[in-house]
Amino acid sequence: MRRVLSLLAILAWVSPALAIGVDDAVLEDPSQEALAQRVMAELRCLVCQNQSIVDSDAPLAADLRAIVRTRLAAGDTPEDIKAYLVKRYGDWVLLNPPLKLGTALLWTAPLLALLLGVTGIVMSRRQKPKQALSAADVEAADAILGDAE
């Protein structure tokens, strides 16, 4: 009885993974499908954010894959498809957004963070210049040390 309950628990736990649908709608022409795959690899899943729509199981990614295939079958070029999706969703839909004024911070942020980090390390390790003791300080130190002996 215990084994049966364990088996049922495992099946209940695994069953949602079996419910994930597969994207069956592929283009009949293998060269067009290969082109569609290349275009889809350059597009970001807007739900998963750092995943291409090829790798994503999100419903929106499936919709974007269908759009790419439909427009490619209709005769659009990959550039036309990307332009359409950028117009609809913005530069964020591209995994490799172009360098423009609006995206300049995205491209320069890692370099700026590195420069700030290096600058912080250099500034924290900088030592203050040593100052010579005045005559009064030397006499006071000698008096203290003389008392200790």
Image (cartoon, rainbow, N blue to C red):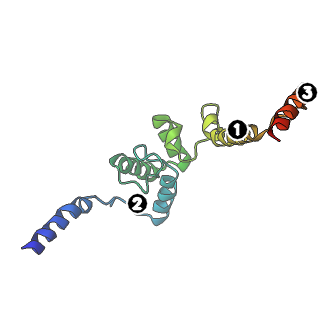
Q: Position of residue 22 (x, y in %)?
A: 31, 60
Q: Which quarter of the image is occupied by the N terminus?
A: bottom left
Q: Nearer the viewer, mark 2 or mark 3?
A: 3
Q: Position of residue 21 (x, y in %)?
A: 28, 58
Q: Are marks 2 and 3 in contact (CB under 8 Å)?
A: no
The numbered mark, 2 or 3, whose residue comes first in the sequence reads: 2
Query: Could you say whether the residue bearing mark 1 is in a helix, strand or loop?
Result: helix
Dot 2: within a 10 Å radius of its alpha carbon, few (fewer than 14), some, or many (20 or more) residues?
some
Residue that label 2 marks: 27
Disc 2 marks a residue whose amino acid type is Leu
- Mark sitting on residue 120: 1
Q: Earlier in the sequence, mark 3 or mark 1?
A: 1
Q: Residue at x 70, y 38 (%)?
A: 120
Task: State left or right for residue 132 relative to residue 94.
Answer: right
Q: Is residue 30 above or below residue 44?
A: below
Residue 75 lies, in percent from the top left, at 48, 50
State the residue at coordinates (88%, 34%).
142
Distance in Å between CA atoms under marks 2 and 1: 54 Å
